[in-house]
């Protein structure tokens, strides 16, 4: 299989809140919105979809689900999101495996890990391919 794109779709009763959250805090561009289904683009092929539950689609249980957002300047993003009122679930900190990041949560309970890459500590360099 040669996958040309990959994007998650969350079935939720919070389609409007999800759209507005990602547009406001992450600069998402709405490329499709029929009310019960929304497609959001984040640039460079990254996208998320949200849809209202249908008869054969139960609401998503996002416990344990994390979306990773690699950004150029994690410190600047941390300041912007904190200033907009989002509370960090995980503080902004350096990680020995090779990033600096923090986490927030979206309206559905999905954890959003925002990070910038940095040089990993020697103990983790061996794992990179």
Image (cartoon, grey):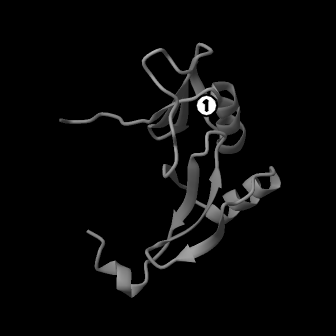
Q: Residue at x 65, y 30 (%)?
A: 19
Quadrant location of the C terminus in the rendered image: bottom left
Q: Residue at x 62, y 62 (%)?
A: 74
In the depicted structure, whether residue 75 falls above or below residue 38? below
Identity of the residue furthest to the bottom in this view: 122
In the depicted structure, whether residue 124 falls above or below residue 24? below
Q: Which residue is mark 1?
A: 29
Q: Secondary structure at mark 1?
A: strand
Residue 104 pos. (x, y %)? 65, 54
Of residues 16 and 54, the one drawn nearer to the viewer in this rendering: 54
Q: Residue at x 43, y 83 (%)?
A: 121
Quadrant location of the N terminus in the rendered image: top left
Q: Residue at x 49, y 16 (%)?
A: 54
Of residues 51 and 121, the one drawn nearer to the viewer in this rendering: 51
Q: Quadrant of residue 25?
A: top right
Residue 53 pos. (x, y %)? 53, 21
Of residues 37 and 69, the one drawn nearer to the viewer in this rendering: 37
- The answer to whether residue 121 is left or right of residue 25 is left
- The answer to whether residue 20 is left or right of residue 115 is right
Residue 63 pos. (x, y %)? 52, 48
Total of numbered circles in the picture? 1
- The answer to whether residue 87 is left or right of residue 125 is right
Q: Residues within 10 Å of mark 1 (few under 14, many from 20)?
A: some
Residue 75 pos. (x, y %)? 67, 65
Identity of the residue furthest to the left in this view: 1
């Amino acid at each position: 299989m040669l996958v040309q794109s990959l994007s998650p779709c969350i079935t939720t009763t919070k389609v409007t809140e999800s759209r507005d959250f990602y547009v406001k805090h992450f600069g998402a561009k709405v490329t499709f919105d029929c009310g019960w289904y929304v497609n959001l683009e984040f640039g460079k092929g990254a996208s998320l979809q949200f849809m209202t539950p249908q008869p054969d689609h139960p609401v998503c249980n996002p416990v344990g689900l994390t979306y990773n957002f690699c950004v150029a300047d994690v410190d600047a993003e941390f300041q912007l999101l904190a200033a907009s009122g989002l509370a960090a679930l995980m503080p902004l900190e350096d990680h020995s495996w090779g990033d600096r990041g923090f986490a927030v949560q979206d309206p559905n309970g999905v954890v959003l890990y925002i990070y910038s890459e940095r040089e990993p500590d020697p103990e983790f360099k061996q794992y990179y391919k």
